[in-house]
Image: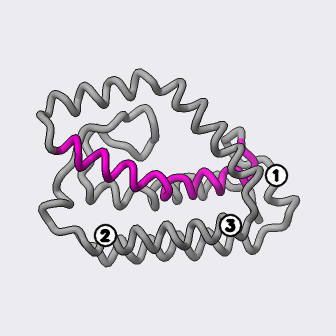
Amino acid sequence: MDTQAVHDDFERARATFRALLDGAGHEELRRRSNGTLWNNRQLLFHMLLGFLIMRALLALARIMARLPRWAGRAWARLLDAGAKPFDVVNFAGSWLGGSLMPRRYMVALADSTIAALHRRLDREDDSSLARGMPYPTRWDPCFREFMTLADLYRFPVQHFDFHRDQLSLT
C-alpha cells in the first residue's frame, strides 16, 4: 500500500472540507443536497462521520481478523440484516450533528480526527495493513465483501468523495 498516497488523500479531503464549510453561506448550507434527504450542512457532517467512525472500524477489523473466517462472515451477515435500523440511526445522527454542531467545531473535529488517522497510519506495518474482515455491503456503497486495514484507511476519503458530488453548493 502506498501510505503516502493515503496521507495525501487525507490532506486533500481535510482542505476540501474546510474550504466547503468556510466558503458556503448560511442559506447554501441549508439548501437541500442532491440525492439525499439532508441539507448541505447535514451532508457535510455525514462526510465527516466517515472519518470519525474509523477508530471503531479499525478496532473491529483487528479483532475479527484474529477469529476464524466463518465468524467474520457471520458477523457481516448479522450487520447486513440490521441495515434498516442502521440507516435510521445514520440518518438521524447526521441530521442532528449537521443541524447543531457549529461550523468551527466541525472543522476542528475534522482536523483533529484526520491528524489522529495520520499518526495511526504511520504506526502500521505491512502485515497489519493486510489483515481484514468481511464487511456488511448494505451499510455503505464503499464497503466491499472483504476489507483489509489498508482498504479501511482508504474508506473515509472514498466516502467523502462519493458524497462530495451530492452537495448542492456553488
The residue positioned 88% from the left and 59% from the top of the image is 27
| Residue beneath disc 3 | 105
Look at the image and tell me in which quarter the C terminus lies: bottom right
| Residue beneath disc 1 | 31
The residue positioned 31% from the left and 31% from the top of the image is 76
Mark 1, other Cα within 10 Å: few <14 / some 14–19 / many ≥20? some
Mark 3, other Cα within 10 Å: few <14 / some 14–19 / many ≥20? few
Q: Indicate the quadrant where residue 110 lies.
A: bottom right
Q: Amino acid at mark 3?
A: Tyr
Q: Residue 121 got which mark? A: 2
Q: Residue 92 got which mark? A: none
Q: Amino acid at mark 1?
A: Arg
Looking at the rendering, the stretch of residues picked out in magenta corresponds to 38-65
Majority secondary structure of magenta residues: helix
Q: Measure the C-alpha gap from mark 1 to mark 2.
A: 36 Å
Left or right, 166 with respect to 28, comes to left
- The mark that comes first in sequence, 1 or 3, is 1
- Percent coordinates x, y for residue 56 in the rendering: 39, 49
Q: Measure the C-alpha gap from mark 3 to mark 2.
A: 24 Å
Tell whether position 168 is magenta: no
Q: Is residue 167 above or below residue 9?
A: above
- The mark that comes first in sequence, 3 or 2, is 3
- Percent coordinates x, y for residue 96 in the rendering: 71, 44
Mark 2, other Cα within 10 Å: few <14 / some 14–19 / many ≥20? some
User: Are the residues tagged 1 and 2 within 8 Å (C-beta)?
Assistant: no
SS of the residue at dot 3?
A: helix
Q: Is residue 81 above or below residue 148?
A: above
